[in-house]
């Protein structure tokens, strides 16, 4: 089984592509394992100074986990533990020492939003949107603390409580993204930004990145602890299973608050 996570290096810039356009770049368990391996590859790649993560096609960056995934994995991933898949959507967990640019070509939802908010810089297409619809599925939004730390609280809270996405213009006005471009121009815009960074001293870039991540880690300690505690409760709930089942059956969930 070929990987849906593609890795290529252009000069000093690595481009990571989620290549499942027929599924709007939803991540299966196998994809998450491959993404985990790709972050490690990027970290150890001495040629690459900056990374870009993008989805294939012009409809979606990544719409989150593939809720219809059966959980089967390829032979290359069969002996890997689930924690490796779980960490794949949190680039900062890898201590990369290199900045990551999210090129948000279309919808970034759930896991896709977590990937975006864990990136250092963000460019979004004019048809793009960022959101956490998981509240409507009985699931805990991943990296929600990154969302509220990176945007005005009323915007973050509205999106998290309602599950409604933030469109490209609102994301720009809120300071969540650096730039809005036409969808056909997004990869070029991301490469331009990446090359502007990559021409500078790698040692200084790493120092800035590590300093920034250190400050973020300091702010995140309690947020991660709270997230883990509440997420464990949500993940073990009957409503979580009901939300996923209702999604697969294309019906409205019957919440029982337990």
Image (cartoon, helix red, strand yellow):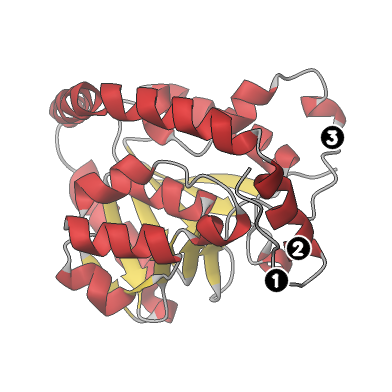
Earlier residue among tags 2 and 1: 2
Earlier residue among tags 3 and 2: 3
Q: Which mark is residue 252?
A: 1
Report the Cα–Cα distance between label 3 and label 1: 33 Å
Mark 3 lies on residue: 74
Quadrant of image for the N terminus: top right
Q: Which residue occupies 62% across, 36% down?
A: 235
Answer whether labels 2 and 1 touch (C-beta < 8 Å): yes
43, 47: nearer the viewer: 43
Report the Cα–Cα distance between label 3 and label 2: 28 Å
Q: Secondary structure at mark 3?
A: loop
Quadrant of image for the C terminus: top right
Earlier residue among tags 3 and 1: 3
250, 104: nearer the viewer: 250
189, 83: nearer the viewer: 83
135 relative to 156 in the view: left or right: right
Q: Which residue occupies 47% across, 32% down?
A: 230
Mark 2 lies on residue: 246
Circle nearer the viewer, 3 or 2:
2
Q: Secondary structure at mark 1?
A: loop
Q: Which residue occupies 42% across, 66% down?
A: 162
Answer whether labels 3 and 2 touch (C-beta < 8 Å): no
Q: Quadrant of residue 199?
A: top left
Question: What is the x, y in percent for residue 134?
Answer: 54, 56
């Amino acid at each position: 089984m070929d990987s849906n996570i593609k890795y290529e290096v252009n000069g000093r810039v690595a481009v990571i592509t989620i290549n499942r356009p027929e599924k709007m770049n939803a991540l299966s368990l196998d994809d998450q394992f491959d993404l985990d391996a790709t972050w490690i590859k990027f970290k150890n790649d001495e040629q690459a100074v900056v990374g870009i993560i993008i989805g294939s096609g012009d409809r979606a960056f990544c719409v989150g986990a593939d809720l219809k995934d059966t959980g089967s994995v390829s032979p290359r991933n069969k002996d890997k533990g689930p924690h490796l898949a779980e960490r794949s959507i949190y680039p900062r967990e890898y201590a990369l020492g290199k900045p990551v640019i999210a090129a948000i070509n279309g919808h970034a939802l759930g896991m896709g939003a977590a990937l975006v908010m864990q990136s250092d810089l963000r460019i979004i297409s004019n048809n793009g949107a960022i959101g956490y619809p998981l509240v409507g599925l009985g699931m805990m939004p991943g990296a929600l603390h990154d969302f509220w730390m990176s945007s005005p609280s009323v915007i973050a809270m509205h999106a998290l409580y309602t599950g409604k996405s933030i469109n490209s213009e609102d994301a720009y006005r809120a300071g969540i993204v650096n730039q809005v471009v036409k969808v056909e121009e997004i990869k070029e815009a991301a490469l331009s930004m990446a090359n502007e960074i990559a021409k500078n001293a790698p040692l200084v870039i790493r120092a800035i990145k590590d300093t920034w991540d250190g400050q973020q880690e300091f702010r995140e300690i309690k947020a991660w602890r709270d997230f883990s505690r509440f997420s464990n409760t949500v993940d073990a709930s009957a409503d979580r299973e009901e939300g996923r089942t209702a999604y697969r059956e294309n019906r409205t969930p019957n919440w029982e608050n337990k």
